Image (tube, rainbow, N blue to C red):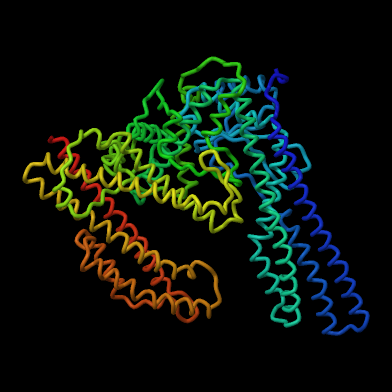
Amino acid sequence: MTNNLPKISSAYQSKLTSAIISVSFFFLIYLALILVSLLMVFLLGYGAIKLLSINVNYLTLIGAGGLFSVGGFVFIFLVKFIFRKNKYNTSHLIEVTRSHQPELFQIIDEIVAETKVQAPKRVFLSPDVNASVSYNSVFWSMFLPVKKNLTIGIGLVNSTSVGELRAILAHEFGHFSQRSMKIGGYVDQAQKIIFETVYNNKDYENFILEFSGGNAIFTFFGHISVGFISAFQYILKNMSSFLFKNHASLQREMEYHADAISTFVTNPEEQTSSLLRLELSDAALAHSINFYIESKEKYLPQNLYKNQTSSMQILSERNNHPYVNGLPKIDIEDLNRYNKSRIEIEDQWASHPDIAKRIEKIKTNKTQNSGFNHRLATEIIKGYDHICEAMTRKYLTLLQIKNVGEIIDNESFVQLYRENSSYENLSLKFNGYYERHNPVLENLEVVLSNPVQIDRDDLFSDTKVSLVYEKAGIEGDLQTLNYLYSHPKDIKTFRFEGTLYKAKDAQSLIPKFENELQKVKNDLLENDKIIFAHFYRISAETDKENLFSTYEKFRMVDKEYDEFQESLNEFIGYLQFMAVTLPFEEIRKHRVKLLQAEKPFKQKIKHLLEDSTYGTLLAEEDRNLLQHYVDAHYIYFNNDRYLQNEVDSLSLLIERYQTLLNEHYLNSKQELVNLQASLDKAY
């Protein structure tokens, strides 16, 4: 059967050749730098001996030691990463064996037989919505054969059928068959070299300068060593972009080829359905985790994967995804619903092609069309609930979530999740129209003076909701076009409506997109006006004033949000110096600028407290926090050290201030939408 498996494509072969050339070139340069450093050791060592041969005294000994140290320090800088231990951490994984999971290994055995690849050395379960092939990548693995491991995410098992899981595993075994994975090992080592030499070298440089012990001559030679190291770092850093872009390009082709093998030994339908559900499944797990993080250690999950299942059901309700054979069915149109971007730029750093492109290729792949298996994948894992609970504990540790708070079952999670979900009404009541759209209206009296009758369902139809995402797509494309025009060297070309453009031509498209954006904004504004007029018309007299004032209140909150957010963003820029290590004199200069910027920022907070709509919404605790900061006279740094209490107080203020802006904005919007929902129900 091996002979019938899909062969690598010409594009794959081309990318493989480019990746081999780039990784070979990198290691040649790296080897050349090592040889240069050895030559420095030899020449400077020879110079040190010559210096001592002239006369042996205190100065010549220090001079000889300084000369020799330059070559030695530079050489050690280039090779020290080899001796760094890189232990493969499996503490967040659960290893399974054939005796533990016979049904899972039966599937693995079948795929191994069909693809004629080497069976995995070890099989792990992970907490993620993912599956992957890996091996312990150490320096010596570049020269020795290494067996690969298979890792299967419980989050993935939790949201697939047996047939879909088989298709996913077949994809991973497609990687097992790729000898080009070895290139990844070389690139991984190159990445470690670059990380250790370019980005993780500050401690070594400090050690070199401290090694002088205050001796002026040794300090001089230390600075020379650091100068040579900086030059070598510049060379390695500039090589990294060339290397990683070529490897990312190869990885994308490897994904296409692994897909082709999966299609051949399984079927395109189950392969496609698992890919289309991937984003929803990942979002459901992320929403579940975020619920516990945002609870501020009040709650802990008993079984995070039962929560994932429930979150997936809630998200499916919001997005009208039907359930088929116990799992949500996602169509390709569902992926495109929220993405209205028309500017296509190849992500040169992406290791995976986007799902739409993968599905497009899968449709053209050869297949044996093996039978479907709609049984839930969770049913083939022995002791599944026990494994999920154990994995939950491991995942919480991995995410550094403290083991405090009340452990809640899934029923409690669903109830609390729905109660605390900001988008529950925003999404369900009005077809998701308000989820990413803010109905800001001015001159409401004028709106009411021009009544337009329209069918209620048309106001929140898919066509109207599509306008919301079309607006977001155009705004995103405008940002992209402006970036392309101002940075033509970063990205050379892009596609728009099937035509290839050069980056410098982006400016010619900007007016077209600006006109389209204005039209869509006008269409949404007109629809918002009709919505307001509709709900005002159907309201009882006692509700009309409430509706009017709620719209007015949200308009003011929207206006003030922009004002307060702009002030906050500007002020935060003056705090960046606290996040890095700087000389004391530099810190003092930055502190002066911070204290100057603090005056208008405090005035803005004072305005929020005394004269804004936000001020009327504040709880007493938040009002006291903001007022305390306005009245305080912090200096943040004194006697060559930060005043940690003041720095922490400022950090707390910034965090809470941003939260207040977001919370009150969303609450005001929710109040408006809830009011309309109640009027809709009464009508």
Q: For residue 361, what is the image quadrant? A: top right
The percent coordinates of residue 475 (x first, y second) are 42, 49
Is residue 389 shown to the viewer in this render?
no
Q: Is residue 400 left or right of residue 123?
A: left
On screen, residue 60 above or below 436? below
The percent coordinates of residue 497 (x first, y second) are 51, 39
In the image shown, does 27 or 503 lie closer to the viewer? 503
Residue at 56%, 57% in the rendered image: 487
In the image shown, does 511 or 546 lie closer to the viewer? 511
On screen, residue 128 above or below 234? above
Residue at 53%, 68% in the rendered image: 580
Of all residues, the one furthest to the top in this rendering is 371
For the N terminus, which image quadrant? top right
Q: Is residue 391 left or right of residue 233?
A: left
Q: For residue 51, what is the image quadrant? A: bottom right
Q: How many marks?
A: 0
For the C terminus, which image quadrant? top left
The percent coordinates of residue 109 (x first, y second) are 63, 21
Of all residues, the one furthest to the right in this rendering is 53
In the image shown, does 477 or 319 lie closer to the viewer? 477
In the image shown, does 437 or 85 lie closer to the viewer? 437
Is residue 315 shown to the viewer in this render?
yes
On screen, residue 191 above or below 575? above
Residue at 53%, 56% in the rendered image: 485
Residue at 72%, 71% in the rendered image: 227
The percent coordinates of residue 521 (x first, y second) are 33, 48
Q: For residue 351, what is the image quadrant? A: top right
